[in-house]
Image (cartoon, rainbow, N blue to C red):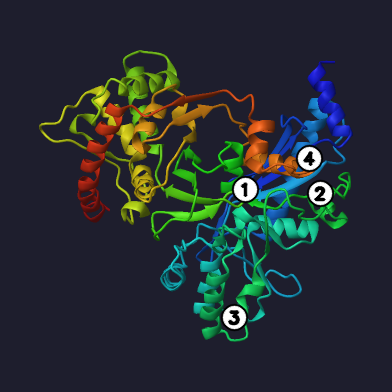
Amino acid sequence: MPKHALDATTAITTGQTSLGIELGSTRIKACLIGPDHEVLATGSHAWENQFVDRLWTYSEEAIWEGLQASIADLKAEVVKAHGVALTSVGSLGLSAMMHGYLAFDADGTMLVPFRTWRNTNTEAAAAALTEELGFNFPLRWSASHVYQAVLDDEPHVAELDFITTLAGYVHWRLTGRKVLGVGDASGVFPIDPATHDYDATMLAGFKGMVAERRPQLDVTMLLPQVLVAGEDAGTLTAEGALLLDPTGDLEAGAPVCPPEGDAGTGMVATNAVAPRTGNISAGTSIFAMVVLEQPLDSVHEELDIVTTPGGDLVAMVHCNNGASELGTWASVFTEFAEAMGVQGGADAVFETLFKAALEGEADGGGLLAYNYLSGEPITGMAEGRPLFVRTPGSRLTLANFMRTQLYGAFGTLSIGMKVLHDEGVRLDSMFAHGGMFRTAGVAQRLLAAAIAAPVSVGDTASEGGAWGIAVLAEYLRKGATTGLGEYLNHDVFADAALDTVSPDADDVAGYDAWLAHYRAGLAIERAATEAIS
């Protein structure tokens, strides 16, 4: 038997494991790791949100059926891979998509269907909270949802006893504890970085705003307790174990770490929890998480202020549009190659196109590209129209075209990042992940120019947030004797291979010139949304 198989089997049978579960928007993933943080087995279950009564939701039944299916899949994988049954774990952690609204009465009955982060019915509440409390409250935050319910005088508000997030709800049912990790809590209500708890001044203001309409409702009593990574968040109860595994195989008693949001577990999974570091995820959407050294001086609609699982402030730049338009153009070139009889596949086409971008002029040759398949709040676009624009004097070459398409994927992100730069925020490194970084040294180099900071790319666990929350559970299991950042650097990522690219001065100057044209050209994008339905 190979040594690693014996070690895995020993870890599983002796309870030297940590289990992470993350409820994402399309998949529920379970990830079992050993004491060296290596993945031992995974399980998953696909699910989809539903649009019910004009609100996006997942049913209670879907939550528990999905969790049970992912655990059953994990158990089967443990038997298949290691030849032993999974009956206990050393620690456990729950994570889920952040924000949203789950409301309960004093008996623990859900009062209205789960309202997810995707709902935008909270515009009036978010605007009022932002204006009154002097802090940017996004539409998807839990505070915006509860205040909107108050403004709309919804009948269930009279019975409110507790509100939480999806991760907080599952954790509560598994442990009996009404708590949240500070990162997830920071998407419920603003956090004071000094206390790692809800901001007391703003909370008092929020209480007063609610009391004007609902004098009997003390909104401060509705919120979960806030915990930081490594703190005791309860243990898996017998009832909770049966909720996860109705077969009864899974034993109760495992310590459970504070439940976290997917943004926090993503930071853990990319070792981006220390000040002056951050991570960028590029996929259908693109977003950056930047760990701050101190609070920002001003309120910015482009920035969400949240925290790491350790409680450090984070500025989040979230853009609705990412790499999808790049993929569409690559498909066109793949069709052309096939029509010419050239075989190589989409990967070869991507690599060829991306490498061509490096030969383009630093300012893109006067070309513009907008990747707006949907609306983009950062630039004030309610709807999107993908555009490629050139003037008679611009230089249309393959190299300039591809450099511009890559610039276009980073356009709105860089606008948000420049807001941070103007606030005096400094970055030592950013970790980038996503399919567009697979061609070595291309998107990475141009992103470094776009954000004027070093960009690192390396191998990360494909399980992402499920692995990240498993690492937080392992951090708890091992006693959390050092800070989270030190633990990640020393115990988890010490041997990780990273490739880091610093911004090239000519690239930065060229990108800045391109971005000035991009900002001016937004009028074209706006006209297109009005003219083309």
User: Along the horizontal axis of the image, is 520 left or right of 24?
Assistant: left
Residue 394 in the image: x percent, y percent? Answer: 15, 31
Residue visible at 80% across and 32% down in the picture? 78
- The mark that comes first in sequence, 3 or 4, is 3
Q: Please tell me whether mark 4 or mark 1 is closer to you in this view.
A: 4
**Distance between mark 3 and mark 4 Cα atoms:** 46 Å
Q: Secondary structure at mark 4?
A: loop
User: Along the horizontal axis of the image, is 371 left or right of 10?
Assistant: left
- The mark that comes first in sequence, 1 or 2, is 1
Q: Secondary structure at mark 3?
A: helix
Q: Relative to residue 27, is residue 5 depicted above or below?
A: above
Q: Residues within 10 Å of mark 2 (few under 14, many from 20)?
A: many
Q: Secondary structure at mark 2?
A: loop
**Distance between mark 4 and mark 1 Cα atoms:** 33 Å
| Residue named by callout 4 | 478
| Residue named by callout 1 | 47
Amino acid residing under circle 3: Pro
- In what quadrant of the picture does the N terminus appear? top right
Mark number for residue 155?
A: 3
**Distance between mark 4 and mark 2 Cα atoms:** 11 Å
Q: Residue furthest left?
A: 392
Amino acid residing under circle 4: Lys
**Distance between mark 1 and mark 2 Cα atoms:** 28 Å
**Distance between mark 3 and mark 2 Cα atoms:** 38 Å
| Residue named by callout 2 | 255
Q: Please tell me whether mark 1 or mark 3 is closer to you in this view.
A: 3
User: Along the horizontal axis of the image, is 363 left or right of 172?
Assistant: left
Residue 356 in the image: x percent, y percent? Answer: 31, 20
Mark number for residue 245?
A: none
Q: Relative to residue 258, is residue 512 depicted above or below?
A: above
Q: Please tell me whether mark 1 or mark 2 is closer to you in this view.
A: 2
User: Along the horizontal axis of the image, is 383 left or right of 161?
Assistant: left
